[in-house]
Image (spheres, helix red, strand yellow):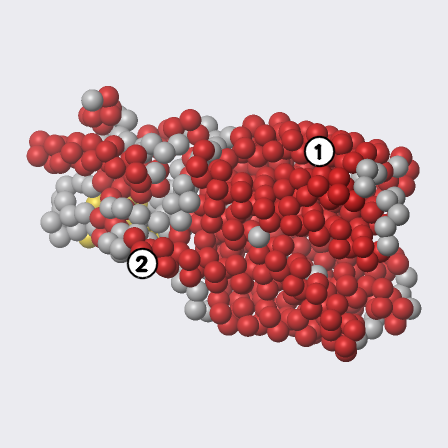
Amino acid sequence: PARTQRRHAVPSGLSASEMASFAGAAITLQIRAAGLGVGPAKSAARNLTARGSGSSRQRKTRRGHAVTMASAGGDKVTSASAAAAGAFGGDLPADKVKQLQSKTLGMMFASYMSIYFVRKPFSVVKAPMQDALGMSTASIAGIDSAFLGLYAIGQLTLPALGDRLGARKMLVVGYLISAVACLLFGVTSNPMLLALAWGINGLAQSVAYPLHVKILNPWFRPTERGTAMGLWATSQQVGGVLSTALAAFLLGVAGWRFAIFAPAAFVVVSAAMLMFVPVDPPWCKTEKAKSNDGEDLVVGDCDAKPPPGMLEVLRIPKLGMLMASYFFVKIVRYCLIFWLPFYLARECGMAVGVAGYMSCIFDLGGVAGGIATGIVCDKYFAGRRTILGAGMCVALTVAILCYQRASGMGMVTNGAVMGIIGLLVAGPDALLGSSSISDTCEAAGYGSEVMGTASGLVNGAGSVGAVLQGALTAFIADRYGWGALFNTLAAMSAIAVVTLLAAVPDTAANAGEPSLPNAGAGAAIATA
C-alpha cells in the first residue's frame, strides 16, 4: 500500500556512510527474516527508515501527527529500534520468554474462563426460577434477549475504549459490574428488573473476549499466535462445563438465587488477578513523545501508537469479510450449542439427562478443533489462516447435511458425527475471533493500537449472528422441520466458505518475509 511504501522509503539527506549503514541493516533484516517472521522485521524497518540527520527526527503516526523526539547524536537508534531489530523477546533468554508467555497465557485462560461463571448459571436455573416466580416463558426469553442484545451492542462499541483507556482497566471495571449485576439478579423477583440486571451483565462482559485478544497479541510471534489463541479459546468450553456443574450443584443445595450470585465470586477474584497481569511484554519497549500540536503520543516497537477512529478501522481491507464470516459461523455454532439437547430429546427419543450428556460430545470436539486448528495454522497457514477456515467450512457443510441421517443410526454414529461437527465449527470460530484479526490488521500496516476495536467489531458481528439464530431456529424448525433447519445451517456454512476466502489478506502470499525499503536505493538493495 502507498502508506506502507511511504513508511519504508529511504530517508533523504543521508551521507554516503549513513547510506551504507542503512543498506547493511536492510540486508541483515533479509537474512534474519527466515527465522524471525514478519513482525520484528517490519518494526525494525520502520524504526531504521525513520532515522535522519540533525539534532532531532520526526515520525508520522497514522493520525498524521509529526512526532519530535530528541536524539543527541542525530543518528542514534532508540532502545525500541534496537529491540525490534533483535530477536523476538529482545535480550531475554529464550527460556525466560517461554516462561513469561506461559504465565500470561495461563492467567488469561483463567480470567476468560471465569466469565462463564456469570454467564452459564441462568441456563441452569431457568426452570426452577420460572416455577418459583410464576414467570411466563416469554419473560424468560426476554431475559435471554436482553443479555444477548446488549452483549452484541457492547462488543461492537466498548472494546474501542480499551484501545484508548487501557485493556486492563476496562476488563477490571467490566468484571466488577458483571458481579454486581449477578448479585442484583439474585435478590429481585420483578421480571423487568431481572431482564435489566441480566442485560447489564451481558453489556459488562462484552469487553472480555476482544480485550483478552488485544492483551495476548504482542506476547506471541505471528507464527505462534494460532497455537496460543487456540489453547486460550478452549477456556470457553472448560469454563462452560465447570460453571454448569457448579450452578447445578448450588441449585440443589441452596436454591436458584444462590446458584446465580455465588459463582460471581470467580470474576471478582479474576478482576483482582488482572491487576497484576503484565499487559505489555518486557521486550515491548515504548517511547513517550509529543506531537507538534502538543498531543501526548506513545511510539515504539510494539506499535503502541494512538488508536485510530472506528471508521478508519472499519476501512481496514478484508476486515468486513472477517465480520461477515464470523456472523455466519456463529449462527451455525450457537444454533447447535443451544438446540442440540432439545433435538436429541425430541427427535431422537433420548431422555433429557442423556441428551444433555450426549451434547457434551459437541463441546469436546470443539476443544480438539480449536487446538488443532491453531497448530496447523501456525505451521502451514501463517498469515493466511482463513484459507484453512474455508476448507473446514467445506467439510462442515457436508457433515451438517449428513447429520440428520446419522443421528438416527445409533448413539455411536450420532456421537461421532456430532463430535466431527464440533471440531469443524470450532476451528473457524477460534481463528476468526483472534489470530485472523491480527493477520488482517498487520497486513494493512496496523498493530496493537487497533486490536481492541477490530476484535470488538469482528466478535460483535458474530454476536449479532448468535442473537438472530434463536428466532431463525425456532421459525424454521417449527414451520418446515428439522431437515430444513440442517439444510439452512449447511447453506450458512457454505456462504462462510466464500467470505473466508475473500478475507485472505492481500499480503498473505508474502507472509513470513520482511517489509524492506522499496523506493530508491532500498529497491536496489532488495533486488540485490
Q: Between 198 and 238, which is closer to the camera in this rendering?
A: 238
Q: Residues within 10 Å of mark 1 (few under 14, many from 20)?
A: some
Q: Amino acid at mark 1?
A: Ala
**Where residue 399 is drawn, which disc sits there?**
1
Q: Quadrant of the N terminus?
A: top left
| Residue 472 seen in the figure | no
Q: CA distance from mark 2 to mark 1?
A: 44 Å
Location of the C terminus by quadrant is top left
Q: Nearer the viewer, residue 309 or 244?
A: 244
Q: Which residue is mark 2?
A: 96
Of mark 2 and mark 1, the one earlier in the sequence is: 2
| Left or right of residue 88: residue 191 | right
Q: Residues within 10 Å of mark 2 (few under 14, many from 20)?
A: few
The part of the image, by quadrant, that contains residue 57 is: top left
Count every numbered label the image shows and give the total: 2
176 vs 485: above or below:
below
Residue at position x 59%, y 30% in the image: 391
The numbered dot on residue 356 is none
Name the residue at the left extreme: 17
Task: Left or right? Give the position of 117 relative to 277.
Answer: right
Residue 114 sits above or below residue 87 on the image? below
Residue 1 as seen in the image, left or right of residue 528 = right
What residue is drawn where x is 63% and y is 38%?
Answer: 424
Q: Amino acid at mark 2?
A: Lys
* x then y, percent, for residue 103: 42, 61
Rendered residue at 88%/72% (across/down): 132
Residue 171 picture location, percent across and down: 53, 62
In the rendered image, is residue 54 in sight? yes
